[in-house]
Amino acid sequence: MKQLHSQDELEAWRQSLPAQAELVLVPTMGALHRGHQSLLEAALAMGQPVLTSIFVNPLQFERADDLQHYPRTLDADLQLLESLGVAAVYLPAANDIVPAGLQVGLDPGPVGSVLEGAARPGHFAGMLTIVHKLFQRCQPQHAWFGEKDAQQLFLVRRMVADLDLRVKIHACPTYREQDGLAYSSRNARLDTQARKEALLLSRALFAAGDAFVQGCQQPRQLEELMRAMFADSPLQLAYAAVVRECDFAPAEAGDGEDWRALIAARIQGIHLLDNLRLTTSV
Ligand code: AMP
């Protein structure tokens, strides 16, 4: 597996690929876990060269302590990527991809300031700015993102559509631990007790999913059901919402089945998020 640090190295490697190859990019912030692995396996299954980027993007952290404590496990990450058969890893330096004095960024539009965007102001502008730069630098034909970050996936798709980017976005379902907790790099920061409490996120989503299957088509009731589950919990709920998958607007009764429940909460200063598509089909 090639390790690429500079733009020159990246471009030289990009040009060494066979002319008919379609480059598949999987952007990450490292601290790779089984969720990343399932995303990478889906990307690798395309049978094309896979490039993974590892970059902890300071622009998408609204809290300095969160950025400082974000887990970093580069050696283990490189071993995993190599063992999976990833062709190259791009490791841009922070002062290269986010130079001092960077002034122009991307505006994520209205969906960028609700839910995760309201809980973390500036998060999506920072995320899109760097994803756009990665697309520019890597020139992939395909890029894979996880449904775990459904609002991010929505905004990346909107960016590609609205700015005429020539990259096809693919989505991978959320990979969960056996008890339902969605794999996340931040889970490594949870102590045993907080890990147990964190299960409430997926439990609340599954409860909303069950209620939906059993016929509750009232989004506000589904939101209330999720919120009520946090009443006696040490988790501080940031939001519990049911939105329309097509535009992230609040779901309304009669919309049909295009709904997704999203939830985020903080424990011991660690921000966790999860979501679930609400569907009656198995
Ligand atoms: P991150 O390193 O957290 O920025 O995540 C990199 C990519 O992995 C993003 O597209 C995430 O949505 C995706 N991802 C993170 N956790 C999971 C998971 N549990 N299952 C599937 N994809 C995930």
Image (spheres, grey):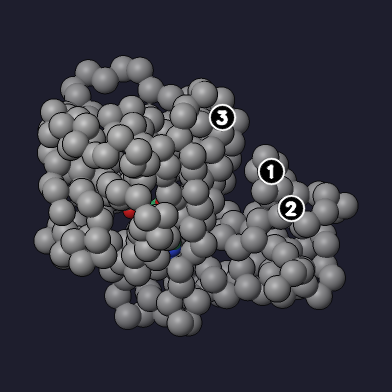
Ligand 1 quarter of the rendering:
bottom left
Q: Is mark 1 within 8 Å of ligand 1?
A: no
* Label 2 with label 1: CB-CB less than 8 Å: yes
The residue depicted at 82 percent of the width and 67 percent of the height is 216
The residue depicted at 40 percent of the width and 60 percent of the height is 45
* Label 2 with label 3: CB-CB less than 8 Å: no
Instruction: Give the left or right position of residue 37, taking residue 197 as reference.
Output: left
* Nearest to N terminus: mark 2 or mark 3: 3
For label 3, the crowd category at 10 Å Cα-Cα, with few meaning under 14, some 14 to 19 and many 20 or more, is: few
Q: Which mark is residue 246?
A: 1
The residue depicted at 42 percent of the width and 42 percent of the height is 142
Q: In this view, does 250 lie above or below 208?
A: above
Badge 2 element:
loop
Q: Is residue 153 above or below residue 121?
A: below
Q: In which quarter of the image is the N terminus?
A: bottom left
Q: Which mark is residue 160?
A: none
User: Picture coordinates of residue 17 (x, y %)?
Assistant: 24, 39
Callout 3 amino acid? Ala
Q: Mark 2 points at which residue?
A: 258
Q: Mark 3 points at which residue?
A: 161
Q: Does the residue labelled 2 lie within 8 Å of ligand 1?
A: no
Residue 105 visible, this orientation: yes
Callout 1 amino acid? Cys
Q: As drawn, which residue projects farthest toward the right?
A: 254
User: Picture coordinates of residue 35 (x, y %)?
Assistant: 39, 65
Rendered image quadrant of residue 259: bottom right
Rendered image quadrant of residue 223: bottom right
Mark 3 or 1: the one toward you: 3
